[in-house]
């Protein structure tokens, strides 16, 4: 009987550690901007990764190319951070927005969980094409890929820095 217990203990130990899903590492983030008038015409969910100030300034100008006067780009400390552009794509009316639910790292993947918020059914909405988006700062290190997931945990799109 003792031999069986001695043989089973290592198996129980291994299954306890290797049977668990990898832990989430919470990531600090900052929402720089949230709007629905992006000049970038993405039809489907999209995540873009911007890693330096020059690229960010150029991206920001394209993002706001439909506005006069153009707003000034927010300040970002790029040696330590990246900026993510998160979009659920084109929407057929006003009233849509994106709610960021969580940002974390699991298995070398930075995961941004978000949901598209729809306008209320009974509310009058302008019948215009909108492109709701978020600009988010995240740490530069600790992951090799970025995924946008919905509130059900389904991957909508991904990008590599």
Image: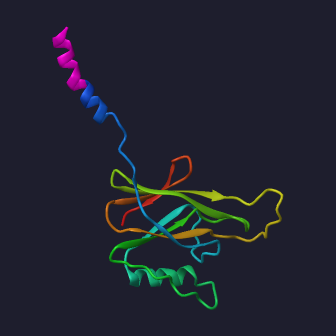
Can you say whether 122 is above or below 9 in the image? below
Residue at far left of view: 3
Q: Is residue 6 magenta?
A: yes
Q: Is residue 35 left or right of residue 110?
A: right
Color scheme of the displayed model: rainbow
In the picture, residue 76 is in which quadrant? bottom left
Residue at far front of view: 2
The number of numbered badges drawn on the structure is 0
Spot occupied by residue 94 in the image (x, y as percentages of width and height): 73, 68
In the picture, residue 92 is in which quadrant? bottom right
In the picture, residue 35 is in which quadrant? bottom right
Q: Where does the magenta region start and end? A: 1-11
Spot occupied by residue 61 in the image (x, y as percentages of width and height): 52, 85
Q: Main secondary structure of the magenta part?
A: helix
Residue 117 appearing in the image: yes
Residue 112 appearing in the image: no
Spot occupied by residue 161 in the image (x, y as percentages of width and height): 36, 67
Spot occupied by residue 12 in the image (x, y as percentages of width and height): 27, 25
Can you say whether 11 is above or below 29 in the image? above
> Which image quarter holds the N terminus?
top left
Q: Nearer the viewer, residue 101 or 124?
A: 101
Can you say whether 20 is above or below 8 in the image? below
Q: Is residue 146 magenta?
A: no
| Residue at position x 22%, y 22% in the image | 9
| Residue at position x 83%, y 65% in the image | 124
Residue at far bottom of view: 69
């Amino acid at each position: 009987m003792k031999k069986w217990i001695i043989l089973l203990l290592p198996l129980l130990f291994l299954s306890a550690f290797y049977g668990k899903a990898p832990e989430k590492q919470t990531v600090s983030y900052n929402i720089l901007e949230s709007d629905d008038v992006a000049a970038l015409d993405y039809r489907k969910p999209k995540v873009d990764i911007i890693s330096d100030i020059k690229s960010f300034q150029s991206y920001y100008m394209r993002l706001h190319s439909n506005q006069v006067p153009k707003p000034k780009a927010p300040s970002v400390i790029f040696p330590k951070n990246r900026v993510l552009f998160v979009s659920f794509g084109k929407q057929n009316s006003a009233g849509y927005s994106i709610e960021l639910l969580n940002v974390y790292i699991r298995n070398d993947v930075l995961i941004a969980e978000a949901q598209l918020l729809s306008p209320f059914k009974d509310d009058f909405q302008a019948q215009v094409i909108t492109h709701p988006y978020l600009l988010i700062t995240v740490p530069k290190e600790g992951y090799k890929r970025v995924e946008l997931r919905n509130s059900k945990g389904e991957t909508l799109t991904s990008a590599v820095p």
